[in-house]
Structure formats: structure tokens, C-alpha cells
Amino acid sequence: MSVAATQDSVLLTLDFSPLKMTDEEFYEFCQRNQDFRFELDKEGNLIVMPPTFLETSRRNLKINVRLGAWAEKDNTGVAFESDGMFTLPNGAKRSPDAFWILKEKYYALSEEEREERFARIVPDFVIELRSKSDNLRKLQSKMSEYIGNGVRLGWLIDPYERRVHIYRADESVEVLENPQKVSGEDVLPAFELDLTEIW
């Protein structure tokens, strides 16, 4: 196994193709390496996610608390934080900083899929929060991947440029410059995130 480091992640080159790993094998790999967070891209590259520093962690907590509180009140879906992982239709295994899935879609999964597998499911809404070490173009590519696989709404929040990139199901992208808030539109009705808490 060889390891290649980049600015925002570490790419592992394995002696086998991760795409040929079963879900069980990938799960076991993750269990054996619990000190690391992984994603698997559609080509089968195993990506080691770097730890976040304090300010990014603070921002991420604010986002997850706000989304979770809205989801509890709205009661039409389920909110998740960054440790949750799912499998997209293209085979990529992803774990955004925050995401939300309609309740009927989530509970259509078996208990085993919800508790013991990287379920094959597409969130309705995702958030990626840029950290200091993140490459913006790679995050933009990931957001496009989410939309291309069926996510209905996505926010890429960049606190360093004070921008929010909004990705919609029609594949349009809108960039808001220094907004005070951002809306969940018709995907998350009445959900607004106060960005003054994030900046």
C-alpha cells in the first residue's frame, strides 16, 4: 500500500481495487482503521479525510444543531451529521458535513441497512462546510456529484470567502456573496440558516 498526500486529503493506493470490495469488506476496513475518516470516490479511490481544527468544528456544530432542531420540529425527515456515510448510485461512499433525508425514504431502509451498512440512499439535502485546508474545486466537484446522483438541494458554505454556493436539482448553481442567511427553499420549507453565526 502506498500513500499520497495532498493539501486537503490523503489518497491511498491499495494493492486491490476498492471498487471490488464488498460493502462488508469496506465496513471491516473502516472498523480496522477507526482513527481515520474515509470516503470512497466513484473511481474507487480511498480518501482519508483530515481532522478538523477548532473553528471548523465550532461552525460545523452550529450548522448541525440548527438543522437538527429544524428537522425535529418539521418532522418530515431525518438529519445527520458528518459521521454518517451513505452509498450513492455511482458507487461513491460519502459523508457530508450535514445532510437530511425524507423520513419515508429513510425508514424504507431495513434496520440492518440503517445500523450496519453504508446504505444505498440519496439524501435530499446536503451541506459541505469548507475548512482552511479544503480545495474549493474539489468541494465543488463533490457538490456536483451529489446533484448528479439525485440530491435535490446542496449548500457549499465557504466561510473564508463568505460565500454560499447553492446547488439545485436542475443543476443550476447560485453563489451568494456574504449573505446573512440562506433558505432551504421548497426542499426544507421554513428552514433558514443564520450565517452570521458561521462567519
Image (cartoon, grey):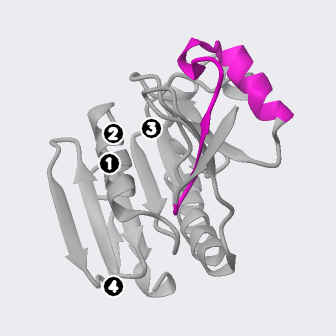
Tag 2–tag 3 contact (CB < 8 Å): no
Within the magenta stretch, is there residue 16? yes
Left or right, residue 141 beside residue 109: left
* Label 1 vs label 3, nearer the camera: 1
The residue wearing badge 3 is 123
- Picture disc at residue 180: 4
- Kind of residue sitting beneath label 2: Glu
At 38% across and 46% down in the image, what residue appears? 142
Say which label, 3 or 4, has the lower sequence index: 3
Say which label, 2 or 4, has the lower sequence index: 2
Looking at the rendered structure, the secondary structure element under dot 4 is loop
Residue 25 place in picture, x, y as percent: 72, 17
Q: How many marks?
A: 4
Tag 2–tag 1 contact (CB < 8 Å): yes
Mark 2–mark 1 distance (CA, rounded to whole Å): 6 Å
- Picture disc at residue 141: 1
- Kind of residue sitting beneath label 4: Gln
Residue 173 place in picture, x, y as percent: 18, 56
At 53% across and 60% down in the image, what residue appears? 8
Which portion, as a residue range, is magenta? 7-32
On screen, 16 above or below 140?
above
Looking at the rendered structure, the secondary structure element under dot 3 is loop
Residue 41 place in picture, x, y as percent: 47, 34
- Kind of residue sitting beneath label 3: Pro
Mark 2–mark 3 distance (CA, rounded to whole Å): 12 Å
The residue wearing badge 2 is 145
- Kind of residue sitting beneath label 1: Ser
At 65% across and 58% down in the image, what residue appears? 50
Looking at the rendered structure, the secondary structure element under dot 2 is helix
Say which label, 1 or 3, has the lower sequence index: 3
Within the magenta stretch, is there residue 13? yes
